[in-house]
Image (tube, rainbow, N blue to C red):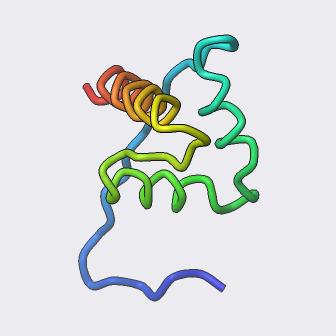
Amino acid sequence: MGRKKLAIPSERMYFNGLLRPGEDDDLIEWYKSLPTGQKFQSLCAVLRSGGGLQTKTEADGEKAAQSMDDILSSMVK
């Protein structure tokens, strides 16, 4: 079942970037853990919440947030 059709057209956005094993393991693990069909919605939720990802420690959280900021800044043109 899809979303209800809106009276105004949606805007298509593309996100593309590279995650590096060893540097971005937390983001790679997070992305791979998302269910099929929920990846974009999950990314939207992270963006709306300020880019914070749930991580094991505060240092990991800061690294994940910085990594997400770096990825997003390289994607937006």
Residue 67 location, quadrant:
top left
| Residue 70, percent from left and from top | 36, 22
**Residue drawn where x is 29% and y is 69% of the image:** 9
Above or below, comparing residue 2 to residue 68 in the picture: below
| Residue 22, percent from left and from top | 67, 11
52 or 73: nearer the viewer: 52
**Residue drawn where x is 59% and y is 13% of the image:** 23
| Residue 45, percent from left and from top | 43, 61
| Left or right of residue 13, residue 33 in this image | right
Above or below, comparing residue 70 to residue 65 in the picture: above
| Left or right of residue 6, residue 24 in this image | right
13 or 18: nearer the viewer: 18
Above or below, comparing residue 16 to residue 57 in the picture: above
Above or below, comparing residue 11 to residue 15 in the picture: below
What quarter of the picture does the C terminus occupy? Answer: top left
- Total label count? 0
What quarter of the picture does the N terminus occupy? Answer: bottom right
| Left or right of residue 2, residue 9 in this image | left
